[in-house]
């Protein structure tokens, strides 16, 4: 949450001492450095926690570090340490904000696990959340999640599934509204039929009821079309889930229309 817990620096700190010190505060997810070339100690430290190291494309300039830490009175070493941490956090601040916004109703532990999957495995929020909260639903995906050569395609396909689920939920919601509307129309018709029979000739009553009946038929046809659409989307989703379970050691390849150079 960009809340600074502690600022410290030491040239005499060895790897074990550093690990012990950091463990007092928690488990790091990202680690920053102000150097383009990642120092050996930082690489070893990150490996111990399986954390991601964020290094700048070029060494951070002193004036840049001073600007980013101007609200703190620090010596040069602590300033550099804080600047590196703030730089690393800035690369994921937007992602963390999105996670917090979309998962505000979830437990803090789930949010932390989603952050970890998004950062370490470079997954999107939806897939990360489902891996944590719906393990049975995505068990086939879990088997291939660490295959780097499949990850991009996996995320693309899973996004497609989530969009279809969203469309299905929308159609079902609209379908329920239409069903309720038809039910209300029929109930109202019963009431109107009694009133009409008392006030106007049978011919006029029949004409009004026919108009209502046409509306009901129209809505029923709309419901039927939505049912068919929902069934189609469900079949497509089942195919995609089945596809994940059959990938195994195979690879996804682009289908070419021909073997011409342009296609490559």
Image (tube, rainbow, N blue to C red):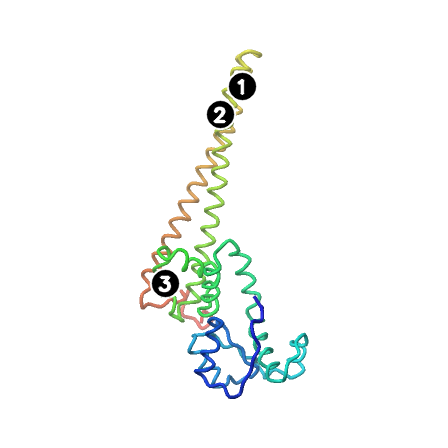
Instruction: Estimate the x, y position of residue 142 in percent, counting from the top left.
Output: 36, 63
Up/down of 154 relative to 45, above or below: above
Up/down of 183 relative to 207, above or below: below
Residue at label 2? 186
Q: Identify which residue, 11 or 60, lies in the foreground.
A: 11
Q: Residue furthest bottom?
A: 12
User: For the residues carrying marks 3 and 2, which lies nearer the camera in this image?
Assistant: 3
Q: Mark 1: few, some, or many residues within 10 Å (few <14, many ≥20)?
A: some
Residue at label 1? 192
Q: Which residue corresponds to the image point at 48% horizontal and 55% vertical from the top-left?
A: 106
Instruction: Estimate the x, y position of residue 81 in percent, counting from the top left.
Output: 57, 80
Q: Which residue corresponds to the image point at 54% horizontal and 65% vertical from the top-left?
A: 95
Q: CA distance from mark 1 to mark 2?
A: 10 Å
Q: Which residue corresponds to the image point at 48% horizontal and 63% vertical from the top-left?
A: 112
Residue at label 3? 142
Up/down of 191 relative to 62, above or below: above
């Amino acid at each position: 949450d960009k809340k600074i817990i502690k600022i410290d620096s030491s040239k005499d700190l060895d790897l074990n001492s550093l690990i012990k010190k950091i463990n007092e505060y928690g488990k790091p997810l990202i680690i920053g450095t102000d150097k383009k070339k990642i120092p050996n100690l930082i690489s070893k430290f990150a490996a111990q926690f399986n954390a991601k190291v964020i290094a700048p494309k070029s060494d951070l300039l002193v004036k840049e570090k001073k600007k980013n830490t101007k609200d703190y009175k620090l010596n040069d070493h602590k300033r550099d340490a804080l600047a590196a941490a703030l730089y690393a956090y800035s690369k994921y601040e937007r992602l963390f904000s999105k996670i917090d916004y979309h998962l505000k109703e979830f437990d803090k532990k789930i949010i932390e696990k989603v952050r970890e999957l998004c950062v370490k495995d470079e997954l999107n929020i939806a897939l990360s959340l489902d891996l944590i909260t719906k393990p049975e639903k995505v068990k086939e995906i879990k088997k291939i999640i660490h295959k780097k050569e499949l990850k991009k395609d996996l995320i693309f396909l899973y996004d497609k599934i989530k969009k279809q689920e969203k469309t299905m939920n929308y159609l079902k919601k609209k379908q329920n509204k239409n069903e309720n509307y038809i039910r209300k129309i029929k109930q109202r018709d019963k009431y109107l039929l009694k009133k009409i029979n008392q006030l106007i000739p049978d011919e006029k009553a029949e004409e009004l009821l026919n108009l209502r009946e046409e509306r009901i038929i129209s809505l029923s046809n709309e419901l039927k079309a939505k049912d068919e659409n929902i069934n189609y989307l469900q079949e497509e989703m089942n195919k995609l889930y089945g596809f994940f379970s059959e990938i195994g050691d195979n690879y996804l390849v682009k289908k070419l229309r021909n073997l011409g150079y342009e296609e490559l």
